[in-house]
Image: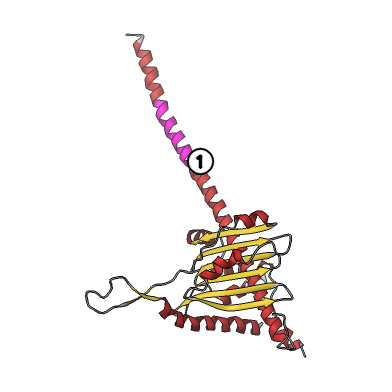
């Protein structure tokens, strides 16, 4: 468990460090700025972590199961009012969504392999090559036929959003979280929601 | 004259009852509207709550998938072995 926590913590630090280098890239000069004083003052344009998700209606029609969740700030605020802070699961969820401005999920499950093309996701991948986005994790699992890419947008070490693209043989999922997401808090939701806890430290010590 | 007086009395009585009846009807309408709006708000809030939990569940599942793949790589006896 501690290894897992360290992994998430290290990723968090890596994202924070990467954020420092992306700030300059995000900085722009405001049009007409500095004309009065003759000195151009840099204005940091804060990029938006909100991705433009394509219309996947054609894929949704082919999919055996699809998830289409769009939660903007007002809906998150509304949902927060219906989470019971005395309930452990709800309290953890409240802690995660506090400070978020949006959660957008598109997930499609198909009955057969190769029912979707990588080109369907290329538009989203292109947006993630914009300044501010840093890839935290890229995994290619032949065993599970699963590719997962996790990106984080950070500016001045502050997380502004997260994007996740998971491509599996019969499923693909895109998650876009806008706002200050804390991976450590998200990790605490493990075991709740039916996601089994990863006890990596004990598995490691049990090995040769 | 004697015929007019009862008619006037009837009209006065009707007006006397009409005003409170209308007020009661308006109050009832407002109350019902308020109740229906409250019900809609509760349903919308509960739906938003379900969606938040569902979205975080999906996110965690995929996050978990990535971390498992990373773990498989780190615990692999042959670091050069393909897999992740």
Q: Quadrant of residue B46?
A: bottom right
Residue A81 in view (yes/no): no
Left or right position of A154 against A201:
left
**What residue would you read off at disc 1?**
B32
Q: Nearer the viewer, residue A46 or A204?
A: A46
The percent position of residue A176, horizontal first and vertical second, equals 55, 67
Residue A203 vs A95, above or below: the answer is below
Q: Nearer the viewer, residue A137 or A85?
A: A137
Residue A72 vs B6, above or below: the answer is below
Left or right position of A9 against B72:
left
Q: Please rate how many residues cluster around mark 1, counting C-alpha atoms within 10 Å: few if below 14, some from 14 to 19, many from 20.
A: few
Looking at the rendered image, the quarter that the N terminus of chain A falls into is: bottom right
Q: Nearer the viewer, residue A37 or A13?
A: A37
Where disc 1 sits, the SS reads helix
Q: Which residues are magenta?
A: B16-31
Looking at the rendered image, the quarter that the C terminus of chain A falls into is: bottom right
Residue A133 in view (yes/no): yes
Image point 74% across, 76% down: which residue?
A: A143
Residue A49 vs B76, above or below: the answer is above
Asked whether residue A122 is drawn in magenta, I would say no
């Amino acid at each position: 468990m501690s290894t897992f926590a360290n992994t998430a913590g290290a990723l968090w630090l890596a994202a924070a460090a990467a954020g420092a280098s992306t700030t300059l890239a995000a900085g722009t000069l405001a049009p007409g700025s500095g004309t009065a004083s003759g000195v151009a003052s840099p204005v940091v344009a804060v990029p938006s972590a909100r991705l433009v998700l394509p219309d996947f209606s054609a894929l949704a029609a082919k999919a055996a199961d699809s998830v289409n969740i769009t939660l903007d700030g007002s809906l998150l605020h509304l949902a927060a009012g219906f989470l019971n802070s005395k309930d452990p699961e709800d309290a953890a969820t409240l802690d995660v969504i506090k400070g978020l401005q949006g959660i957008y999920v598109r997930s499609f499950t198909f009955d057969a392999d190769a029912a979707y093309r990588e080109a369907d996701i290329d538009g989203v991948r292109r947006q993630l090559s914009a300044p501010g986005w840093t890839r935290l994790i890229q995994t290619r699992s032949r065993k599970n036929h699963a590719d997962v890419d996790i990106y984080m947008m950070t500016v001045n070490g502050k997380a502004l959003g997260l994007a996740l693209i998971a491509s599996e043989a019969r499923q693909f999922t895109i998650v876009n979280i806008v706002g200050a997401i804390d991976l450590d808090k998200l990790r605490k939701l493990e075991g709740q929601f039916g996601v089994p806890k990863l006890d990596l430290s004990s598995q490691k010590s049990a090995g040769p | 004259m004697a015929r007019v007086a009862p008619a006037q009395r009837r009209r006065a009585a009707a007006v006397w009852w009409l005003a409170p009846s209308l007020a009661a009807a308006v109050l009832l309408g407002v109350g019902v509207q308020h109740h229906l709006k409250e019900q809609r708000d509760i349903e919308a809030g509960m739906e938003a709550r379900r969606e938040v939990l569902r979205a975080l569940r999906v996110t965690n599942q995929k996050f978990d998938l990535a971390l498992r793949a990373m773990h498989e790589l780190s615990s692999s006896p042959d670091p050069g072995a393909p897999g992740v």
